[in-house]
Protein backbone atom coordinates (compact mmCIF):
# COMPACT_ATOMS: atom_id res chain seq x y z
CA UNK A 1 0.00 0.00 0.00
CA UNK A 2 1.30 3.36 -1.08
CA UNK A 3 -0.04 6.86 -0.45
CA UNK A 4 1.51 9.50 -2.67
CA UNK A 5 -0.60 12.54 -1.80
CA UNK A 6 -0.45 13.70 1.83
CA UNK A 7 -0.70 17.21 3.33
CA UNK A 8 0.72 18.23 6.70
CA UNK A 9 0.76 21.52 8.63
CA UNK A 10 3.17 22.77 5.96
CA UNK A 11 0.06 23.21 3.82
CA UNK A 12 -2.14 26.25 4.43
CA UNK A 13 -5.12 23.86 4.86
CA UNK A 14 -3.20 20.99 6.52
CA UNK A 15 -4.69 19.56 9.71
CA UNK A 16 -1.98 17.17 10.92
CA UNK A 17 1.66 17.15 11.83
CA UNK A 18 4.09 15.17 9.72
CA UNK A 19 4.63 12.93 12.71
CA UNK A 20 0.87 12.21 12.98
CA UNK A 21 0.80 11.35 9.27
CA UNK A 22 3.67 8.87 9.70
CA UNK A 23 2.00 7.30 12.72
CA UNK A 24 -1.25 6.97 10.73
CA UNK A 25 0.69 5.49 7.80
CA UNK A 26 2.29 2.77 9.89
CA UNK A 27 -1.04 2.22 11.63
CA UNK A 28 -2.75 1.37 8.36
CA UNK A 29 0.15 -0.63 6.98
CA UNK A 30 1.46 1.70 4.26
CA UNK A 31 4.75 0.56 2.74
CA UNK A 32 5.49 3.97 1.27
CA UNK A 33 4.20 7.52 1.59
CA UNK A 34 4.97 10.90 0.05
CA UNK A 35 4.43 14.28 1.65
CA UNK A 36 3.02 16.54 -1.03
CA UNK A 37 2.35 19.84 0.68
CA UNK A 38 0.88 22.71 -1.29
CA UNK A 39 3.14 25.10 -3.13
CA UNK A 40 1.21 27.70 -5.08
CA UNK A 41 3.31 30.34 -6.77
CA UNK A 42 1.34 33.60 -6.89
CA UNK A 43 -1.78 32.27 -5.26
CA UNK A 44 -4.49 34.93 -5.71
CA UNK A 45 -5.46 35.18 -2.02
CA UNK A 46 -2.42 36.82 -0.43
CA UNK A 47 -3.88 36.46 3.09
CA UNK A 48 -3.73 32.70 2.73
CA UNK A 49 -0.66 31.90 0.68
CA UNK A 50 -0.54 28.21 -0.11
CA UNK A 51 3.21 28.10 0.12
CA UNK A 52 5.72 25.98 2.00
CA UNK A 53 7.31 28.83 3.93
CA UNK A 54 10.55 27.18 4.99
CA UNK A 55 11.80 24.69 2.42
CA UNK A 56 14.96 23.82 4.35
CA UNK A 57 12.87 22.90 7.39
CA UNK A 58 10.46 20.94 5.19
CA UNK A 59 13.29 18.80 3.88
CA UNK A 60 14.93 18.50 7.33
CA UNK A 61 11.69 17.40 9.03
CA UNK A 62 11.04 14.75 6.39
CA UNK A 63 14.64 13.58 6.70
CA UNK A 64 14.32 13.24 10.45
CA UNK A 65 11.09 11.22 10.10
CA UNK A 66 12.64 9.08 7.37
CA UNK A 67 15.29 8.01 9.86
CA UNK A 68 12.84 7.58 12.70
CA UNK A 69 10.48 5.39 10.64
CA UNK A 70 13.21 3.50 8.84
CA UNK A 71 12.09 -0.10 8.33
CA UNK A 72 8.44 0.80 8.96
CA UNK A 73 7.43 3.08 6.10
CA UNK A 74 9.42 4.63 3.26
CA UNK A 75 8.96 8.41 3.27
CA UNK A 76 9.36 10.50 0.14
CA UNK A 77 9.70 14.25 -0.25
CA UNK A 78 7.12 15.56 -2.65
CA UNK A 79 5.15 18.65 -3.42
CA UNK A 80 1.76 19.48 -4.91
CA UNK A 81 2.66 22.31 -7.22
CA UNK A 82 -0.09 24.67 -8.36
CA UNK A 83 -0.02 25.56 -12.03
CA UNK A 84 -1.10 28.91 -13.45
CA UNK A 85 -0.41 30.27 -16.93
CA UNK A 86 1.96 32.99 -15.69
CA UNK A 87 4.00 30.92 -13.18
CA UNK A 88 5.55 28.21 -15.35
CA UNK A 89 9.07 29.58 -15.41
CA UNK A 90 9.10 30.10 -11.65
CA UNK A 91 7.55 26.67 -11.13
CA UNK A 92 10.33 25.05 -13.17
CA UNK A 93 12.99 26.93 -11.25
CA UNK A 94 11.38 25.95 -7.98
CA UNK A 95 11.34 22.23 -8.83
CA UNK A 96 14.88 22.27 -10.22
CA UNK A 97 16.33 24.00 -7.19
CA UNK A 98 15.06 21.38 -4.71
CA UNK A 99 15.81 17.67 -4.41
CA UNK A 100 12.25 16.39 -4.68
CA UNK A 101 11.43 12.72 -5.03
CA UNK A 102 8.03 13.41 -6.51
CA UNK A 103 6.07 16.33 -7.95
CA UNK A 104 2.32 16.50 -8.56
CA UNK A 105 1.27 19.22 -11.00
CA UNK A 106 -2.17 20.37 -9.91
CA UNK A 107 -4.61 22.89 -11.27
CA UNK A 108 -6.50 24.76 -8.56
CA UNK A 109 -7.13 28.02 -10.41
CA UNK A 110 -9.28 28.58 -13.50
CA UNK A 111 -9.60 32.15 -14.75
CA UNK A 112 -8.38 33.40 -11.38
CA UNK A 113 -10.77 31.35 -9.26
CA UNK A 114 -10.56 28.06 -7.38
CA UNK A 115 -13.44 25.62 -8.14
CA UNK A 116 -13.40 24.99 -4.40
CA UNK A 117 -15.47 28.19 -4.15
CA UNK A 118 -19.16 28.22 -5.20
CA UNK A 119 -18.51 31.37 -7.29
CA UNK A 120 -16.70 29.22 -9.81
CA UNK A 121 -19.99 27.54 -10.69
CA UNK A 122 -22.18 30.66 -10.58
CA UNK A 123 -22.00 31.54 -14.26
CA UNK A 124 -21.25 28.08 -15.54
CA UNK A 125 -23.41 25.14 -16.53
CA UNK A 126 -22.44 21.64 -15.43
CA UNK A 127 -20.81 21.12 -18.85
CA UNK A 128 -18.95 24.44 -18.84
CA UNK A 129 -17.62 23.89 -15.33
CA UNK A 130 -15.78 20.76 -16.50
CA UNK A 131 -14.80 22.05 -19.93
CA UNK A 132 -13.25 25.27 -18.58
CA UNK A 133 -11.23 23.23 -16.09
CA UNK A 134 -9.94 20.82 -18.76
CA UNK A 135 -9.18 23.68 -21.17
CA UNK A 136 -7.08 25.35 -18.51
CA UNK A 137 -5.04 22.18 -18.04
CA UNK A 138 -4.68 21.68 -21.77
CA UNK A 139 -3.56 25.23 -22.42
CA UNK A 140 -0.88 25.21 -19.69
CA UNK A 141 0.47 21.67 -19.72
CA UNK A 142 2.41 21.84 -23.01
CA UNK A 143 4.70 24.48 -21.45
CA UNK A 144 5.66 22.52 -18.35
CA UNK A 145 7.71 19.36 -17.85
CA UNK A 146 9.03 19.48 -14.28
CA UNK A 147 6.54 17.13 -12.68
CA UNK A 148 5.71 13.42 -12.46
CA UNK A 149 1.93 13.12 -12.37
CA UNK A 150 -1.05 15.34 -13.05
CA UNK A 151 -3.16 15.77 -9.89
CA UNK A 152 -6.91 15.07 -9.63
CA UNK A 153 -7.65 15.43 -13.34
CA UNK A 154 -11.40 16.04 -12.94
CA UNK A 155 -11.21 18.02 -9.69
CA UNK A 156 -14.41 19.91 -10.55
CA UNK A 157 -16.42 16.81 -9.62
CA UNK A 158 -15.26 17.09 -6.01
CA UNK A 159 -16.97 20.46 -5.58
CA UNK A 160 -19.74 20.49 -8.17
CA UNK A 161 -22.99 21.95 -6.79
CA UNK A 162 -24.83 20.21 -9.64
CA UNK A 163 -24.44 16.89 -7.88
CA UNK A 164 -22.97 13.86 -9.54
CA UNK A 165 -24.36 12.53 -12.79
CA UNK A 166 -23.12 9.18 -14.05
CA UNK A 167 -22.43 10.74 -17.46
CA UNK A 168 -20.23 13.52 -16.09
CA UNK A 169 -17.11 11.77 -17.33
CA UNK A 170 -18.37 12.10 -20.91
CA UNK A 171 -18.26 15.90 -20.72
CA UNK A 172 -15.27 17.32 -22.56
CA UNK A 173 -13.94 13.85 -23.27
CA UNK A 174 -12.12 15.04 -26.41
CA UNK A 175 -10.07 17.50 -24.33
CA UNK A 176 -9.50 14.87 -21.64
CA UNK A 177 -8.19 12.51 -24.30
CA UNK A 178 -5.89 15.23 -25.65
CA UNK A 179 -4.57 15.85 -22.11
CA UNK A 180 -3.90 12.13 -21.60
CA UNK A 181 -2.10 11.85 -24.94
CA UNK A 182 0.03 14.86 -24.04
CA UNK A 183 0.94 13.28 -20.68
CA UNK A 184 1.91 10.03 -22.37
CA UNK A 185 4.02 11.91 -24.92
CA UNK A 186 5.81 13.66 -22.07
CA UNK A 187 6.29 10.42 -20.09
CA UNK A 188 4.11 11.73 -17.30
CA UNK A 189 1.48 9.97 -15.25
CA UNK A 190 -1.80 10.48 -13.53
CA UNK A 191 -2.75 9.90 -9.93
CA UNK A 192 -5.77 8.06 -8.60
CA UNK A 193 -6.89 10.56 -6.00
CA UNK A 194 -9.16 8.78 -3.53
CA UNK A 195 -10.49 12.01 -2.01
CA UNK A 196 -13.27 11.74 -4.61
CA UNK A 197 -14.49 8.64 -2.74
CA UNK A 198 -15.14 10.84 0.30
CA UNK A 199 -17.41 13.17 -1.71
CA UNK A 200 -20.76 12.96 -3.52
CA UNK A 201 -19.77 10.76 -6.44
CA UNK A 202 -18.02 8.19 -4.21
CA UNK A 203 -15.53 7.68 -7.02
CA UNK A 204 -11.85 8.55 -7.22
CA UNK A 205 -10.50 11.44 -9.28
CA UNK A 206 -10.30 11.04 -12.18
CA UNK A 207 -13.31 8.91 -13.01
CA UNK A 208 -12.49 5.20 -13.60
CA UNK A 209 -13.41 5.66 -17.27
CA UNK A 210 -10.61 8.23 -17.62
CA UNK A 211 -8.14 6.02 -15.74
CA UNK A 212 -8.90 3.17 -18.16
CA UNK A 213 -8.64 5.53 -21.14
CA UNK A 214 -5.15 6.60 -20.03
CA UNK A 215 -4.09 2.93 -19.95
CA UNK A 216 -5.72 2.16 -23.32
CA UNK A 217 -3.90 5.10 -24.89
CA UNK A 218 -0.62 3.61 -23.65
CA UNK A 219 -0.17 5.33 -20.28
CA UNK A 220 1.69 3.37 -17.63
CA UNK A 221 2.65 5.82 -14.90
CA UNK A 222 0.10 5.82 -12.12
CA UNK A 223 0.20 6.66 -8.41
CA UNK A 224 -2.39 6.42 -5.64
CA UNK A 225 -2.98 9.30 -3.24
CA UNK A 226 -5.49 9.95 -0.50
CA UNK A 227 -5.09 13.76 -0.57
CA UNK A 228 -5.30 13.45 3.22
CA UNK A 229 -5.28 16.67 5.21
CA UNK A 230 -6.39 14.80 8.38
CA UNK A 231 -4.65 11.81 9.94
CA UNK A 232 -7.72 9.58 9.61
CA UNK A 233 -7.59 9.92 5.81
CA UNK A 234 -4.02 8.67 5.35
CA UNK A 235 -4.19 5.55 3.18
CA UNK A 236 -7.89 6.15 2.56
CA UNK A 237 -9.40 3.99 -0.21
CA UNK A 238 -6.05 2.44 -1.02
CA UNK A 239 -7.29 -1.12 -1.55
CA UNK A 240 -10.20 0.01 -3.72
CA UNK A 241 -7.88 2.15 -5.82
CA UNK A 242 -5.45 -0.71 -6.30
CA UNK A 243 -8.23 -3.06 -7.41
CA UNK A 244 -9.50 -0.39 -9.77
CA UNK A 245 -6.07 0.18 -11.29
CA UNK A 246 -5.71 -3.55 -11.83
CA UNK A 247 -9.13 -3.82 -13.44
CA UNK A 248 -8.19 -0.96 -15.78
CA UNK A 249 -5.31 -3.04 -17.13
CA UNK A 250 -2.34 -1.71 -15.18
CA UNK A 251 0.17 -4.28 -14.00
CA UNK A 252 2.37 -1.84 -12.10
CA UNK A 253 2.03 1.01 -9.68
CA UNK A 254 4.65 3.75 -9.78
CA UNK A 255 6.81 5.14 -6.99
CA UNK A 256 9.49 7.82 -7.35
CA UNK A 257 12.94 8.58 -6.00
CA UNK A 258 14.63 11.77 -7.11
CA UNK A 259 11.75 12.11 -9.63
CA UNK A 260 12.75 8.84 -11.32
CA UNK A 261 9.96 6.29 -11.66
CA UNK A 262 10.17 2.77 -10.38
CA UNK A 263 7.50 0.28 -11.31
CA UNK A 264 6.18 -2.07 -8.67
CA UNK A 265 4.21 -5.09 -9.80
CA UNK A 266 0.68 -5.13 -8.44
ZN1 LIG B 1 -5.11 19.56 -5.08
ZN1 LIG C 1 -3.76 17.85 -2.37
Image (cartoon, rainbow, N blue to C red):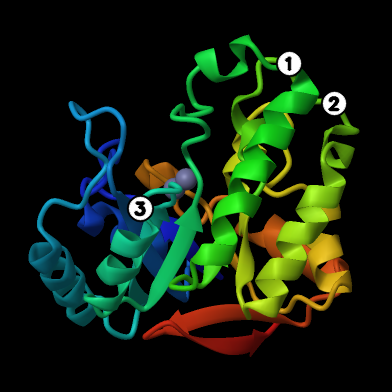
Separation of residues labelled 2 and 3 (CA atoms): 34 Å
Quadrant for the N terminus, please: bottom right
- Residue at 49%, 66% (x, y): give it: 144
On screen, residue 167 versus residue 2, left or right, reads right
Label 2, on which residue?
A: 165
Alpha carbons under labels 3 and 1: distance apart: 31 Å
Q: Residue at x 9, y 64 (%)?
A: 57
User: In screen coordinates, is 27 left or right of 210?
Assistant: left
Disc 3 versus disc 1: nearer the observer: 3
- Residue 127 left/right relative to 230: right
Question: From the viewer's perspective, is residue 69 above or below residue 206?
Answer: below
Q: Position of residue 44 (x, y in %)?
A: 31, 31
Give the answer, above or below, for where 208 lies relative to 1.
Answer: above
Q: Earlier in the sequence, mark 2 or mark 3?
A: 3
Instruction: Answer above or below: position of 176 versus 261.
Output: above
Q: Give the camera-side residue of 77 and 95.
A: 95
Image disc number at residue 87: 3
Earlier in the chain: of badge 3 and badge 1, it is: 3
Ligand 1 contact, mark 2 (Cβ < 8 Å)? no
Q: Position of residue 184 (x, y in %)?
A: 71, 75
**Cβ atoms at labels 3 and 1 below 8 Å apart:** no
Disc 1 target residue: 162
Q: CA distance from mark 1 to mark 2?
A: 8 Å
Tag 3 secondary structure = loop
**Left or right of 222, for residue 143:** left
Where is 83 relative to 118, above or below?
Answer: below
Q: Residue at x 27, y 27 (%)?
A: 45
- Secondary structure at badge 1 equals loop
Q: Nearer the viewer, mark 2 or mark 3?
A: 3
Amino acid sequence: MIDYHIHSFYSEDGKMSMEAACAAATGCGLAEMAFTDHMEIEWPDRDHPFEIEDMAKYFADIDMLRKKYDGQVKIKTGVELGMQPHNLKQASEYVRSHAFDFVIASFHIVDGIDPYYPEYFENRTREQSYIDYYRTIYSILPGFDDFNVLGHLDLVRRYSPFGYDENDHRIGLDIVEAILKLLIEKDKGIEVNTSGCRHTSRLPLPHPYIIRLYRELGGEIITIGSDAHHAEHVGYGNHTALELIKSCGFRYITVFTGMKPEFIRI
